[in-house]
Image (cartoon, grey):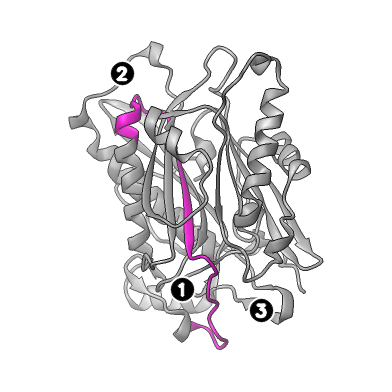
Amino acid sequence: MTPPSSASSRPRLADLGVPSGAFARGVENAITDVDGVRVGQVTLHGDGLHTGVTAIVPDALTAQRRSLPANLSVGNGYGKLVGATQLRELAALETPILLTSTLSVFRVADALLGQLLATPAHARTTTLNPVVGETNDGFLSDIRRRAVGEEQVIEALDAAAPGPVAEGAVGAGAGTVALGYKGGIGTSSRLVDVAGQTRTVGALVQTNFSGTLRIAGVPLPAEELLAEEPAQPVGNSCMIVVATDAAVDGRQLGRVANRAVFAMRGVGADYAQGSGDYAIAFSVHDPALGGPVADDELSPLFAATMDAVEEALINSVLAAETTVGPEGRTAHAVPVDRVRERLARAGAV
């Protein structure tokens, strides 16, 4: 089994010359452009494994502020999203959000819960809702080993940092497949005017779904661009996390999360029967500073969310290196030169 090489030499969407649309990208073009949102990842490559965990950690969760406004959109519910019902019912996020492999999700949720209960802030806590999502990396990894657990969760939480976010075959995206190519972790952000204030919306995705890749509206079928057999995902799912500093409440964040799921269609998702497509949206805005904004002010935030999610989905594929799993099963990297050629021919760049 061959671990992928570093994805640092592979381009992001912006590197291909595709414009950001109506809204500017953030400094890092990542979910971490939202102030106080950190990301940590642990990747397991080798010994039959391509798997890991990705942690999205909002610093706004403190001993004094035990929850953030948040909500959930379920595009298709074929998944194992721990914490989903309370997240939707109370429109509140109580913990960092962790992403991992399908059969490891329960071990990861238990480890996250254990870490939080051990902190002074939760010394007397008797109920807490850990939020852990997943996609199936069984095409490229020995998923039945449930290799991600307490050690990896602690490491990912400790590693969580602001700034650039590694993409492609890393963390929870180490063994995933998307749109016939190697998928993985992707991220992006947009700056948007909401009620007269410049706000940031950032997205991070874990891609493992079928369909025909589209960039800037240009079809890029794996059957045509690859000389090899396209990869077929197991489980066929996508996790999307959206963060913002806009002054929005939990109900409004449900509407934001809906738009995040809509964005999958822009990159060619087919929303197949067995897909678990989820979007979680949360805000780090301090309610003491005012809000929520009026619903009539939300349209720019909706549009910026769809742009950021669509770019994050594309980045997850562009950044991913060819990965070989057990029994020679292979997910090939999207051939960047052929992508550039088709985009130029279509006048997209």
Q: Residue furthest bottom?
A: 227
In this rendering, the label closer to the viewer, 2 or 1? 2
> Which of disc 3 and disc 2 is earlier in sequence?
2
Q: Position of residue 215 (x, y in %)?
A: 39, 67
In this rendering, the label closer to the viewer, 3 or 1? 3
Q: Residue at x 57, y 61 (%)?
A: 136
Q: Position of residue 123 (x, y in %)?
A: 68, 15
Q: Residue at x 42, y 46 (%)?
A: 279
Amino acid on which disc 3 is placed: Arg
Quarter holding the N terminus?
bottom right
In the rendered structure, find residue 340 and report the number of the disc placed on it. Answer: 1
Instruction: Kindly report the distance in space between the C-alpha atoms of the residues bearing marks 2 and 1.
Output: 44 Å
Q: Residue furthest right?
A: 47
Label 2: few (<14), some or many (≥20) within 10 Å? few
Q: Is residue 246 magenta?
A: yes
Span highlighted in magenta in the image: 225-253
Amino acid on which disc 2 is placed: Gly
Disc 3: which residue: 329
In this rendering, the label closer to the viewer, 2 or 3? 3
Disc 2: which residue: 291
> Which of disc 1 and disc 3 is earlier in sequence?
3
